[in-house]
Amino acid sequence: MIHTKDAPDGDPFGSFRAQVAFLDRSFPQGRIARLDPSGFSVEGLSDHAILGDELLFHDAGGTLRRAEVSRLDRDSLWAIPYAASDGLRIGLPVRPSGTPRINPHEGWIGRIVDPFGQPLDDMPLAPGFSVPLRAAPPAPARRRGMGHRLCTGFAVLDTMLPIAKGQRIGLFAGSGVGKSTLLGSLARTMEADICVLALVGERGREVSDFVRTVLGPEGMARTIVVVATSDMPANTRRRCAFSALAVAEHFRDRGRHVLFLCDSLTRLAEAHREVASAAGEATSLRGHPPSLTPLLASLCERAGPGEDRPDSTVQGDITAVFSVLVAGSDMEEPVADIVRGQLDGHVVLARDIAEAGRFPAIDVLRSISRSLPAAANAEENALIAETRQLLAVHDRSDLMVSSGLYERGSSPDIDRAVALIPRLNDIFSAQGLTRSTDGFRLLAGLLGRSYAGPGG
């Protein structure tokens, strides 16, 4: 594989020299010894590759192909190609290519690429600086805490569930409750320098529809979209999330604040299950392999606040939103259960709220942001606490009120909740806010409280 690095200024052949410098003058070679639809066994490379490395080979038609090392034995290794196994035969030569890499570039902003950095919008794409897909997260001892509260444009997020700079939050939702629309809105409006969006296992038709109608020109103006559609092999779909994160890290390391959106971790987990099963790993975690937990942890940990470096160079932050598909709102299913403990909060989208016509369909009582209470001042935290208490009273009494068993005047708290909840739902549906304090002013007005703002 050819990698690129920054070329010397003023050298017209600098880019070419940089590529030649990385060319291998010699390399070991193995051969395909066994083959089935899920992958192939290679003899002769066990001492020259590690798990996750890439292999290069030409199929029977002469096309250059790639594969991923998924299992190592003493005398052979098992590899899964990044495409169908058609065109392969016993005896084809294979050579190692090292750790998977991608070459992000400033010119990628506004573009759609695949997990290998190839353009999907029929226009040429400039290669940039080569970065590995597997990277360590910022050092724990030097990592900064979460930063200031970000403006999302949605009143319910700016108040009850604030997202702070460098926070990692999960968006838990079933199908058809507005998850993709909310992600697209955040890509357009949420405070950030650049947005990197990973669409893992998405249907091809929905990719173009998402880019044109949900993101639109406004969202694409600052977004890099990395796509692996549902018909692609499992290891390509799994690679999508890590390629997108490597792109986000590239811009973070240049001091940028990156908004990283991944849709979805559930499809990533499904792709990993296919790869792990093909490599011989047992699926003992309610249908998922044990290696799923460290895989998701490595992805989540690499996002978040940057670090304060000893050389005083500035590293930016990655604020991340990971979507998780939960069938039947089952928050205890393996992917949801694993991720909930690794992130800095979770936002639950409820079907009954969506069916009532509210957007975003966020169930505030079942959601939490771990940026609180630090992300709000004392006055704002008091408004949040009073609003949550109001929601809790309404939740406990809703069945009694709706069935006609409650007599008005029996409880002042219930009477107040019944009177205010419709207006509160209107506030939670408010969007297009330009400041994170605008939502608190709406809450204060509803609750009959004064609000002086951050400087008050």
Image (cartoon, rainbow, N blue to C red):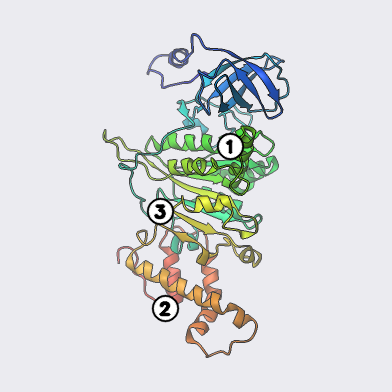
Mark 2 lies on residue: 448
Front-lying residue, 405 or 229: 405
Report, in whole angstroms, how far the alpha carbon at label 1 lies from the one at label 3: 28 Å
Classed neighbour count for the residue bearing mark 2: other residues with Cα under 10 Å, few (<14), some (14–19), many (≥20): few
**Which is more N-terminal, label 2 or label 1?**
1
Q: Are marks 1 and 2 in contact (CB under 8 Å)?
A: no
Mark 3 lies on residue: 164
Q: Is residue 186 visible?
A: no
Mark 2, secondary structure of its residue:
loop
Coordinates of residue 8 in the picture (x, y in percent): 38, 17
Mark 1, secondary structure of its residue:
helix
Q: Is residue 149 above or below residue 230?
A: below
Q: Residue furthest top?
A: 25
Mark 1 lies on residue: 238
Q: Are marks 1 and 3 in contact (CB under 8 Å)?
A: no
Q: Is residue 168 visible?
A: yes
Q: Nearer the viewer, mark 3 or mark 2?
A: 3
Coordinates of residue 413 in the picture (x, y in percent): 48, 83
Front-lying residue, 242 or 130: 242
Say which residue appears at 33% left-offset and 63% top-offset: 454
Coordinates of residue 312 in the picture (x, y in percent): 27, 36
Q: Nearer the viewer, mark 1 or mark 2?
A: 1
Front-lying residue, 29 or 208: 29
Under mark 1, the amino acid is: Arg
**Which is more N-terminal, label 3 or label 1?**
3
Front-lying residue, 122 or 413: 413
**Which is more N-terminal, label 2 or label 3?**
3
Report, in whole angstroms, how far the alpha carbon at label 1 lies from the one at label 2: 50 Å
Q: Are marks 3 and 2 in contact (CB under 8 Å)?
A: no
Q: Indicate the quadrant containing the C terminus: top left, top right, bottom left or bottom right.
A: bottom left
Report, in whole angstroms, how far the alpha carbon at label 3 lies from the one at label 2: 27 Å
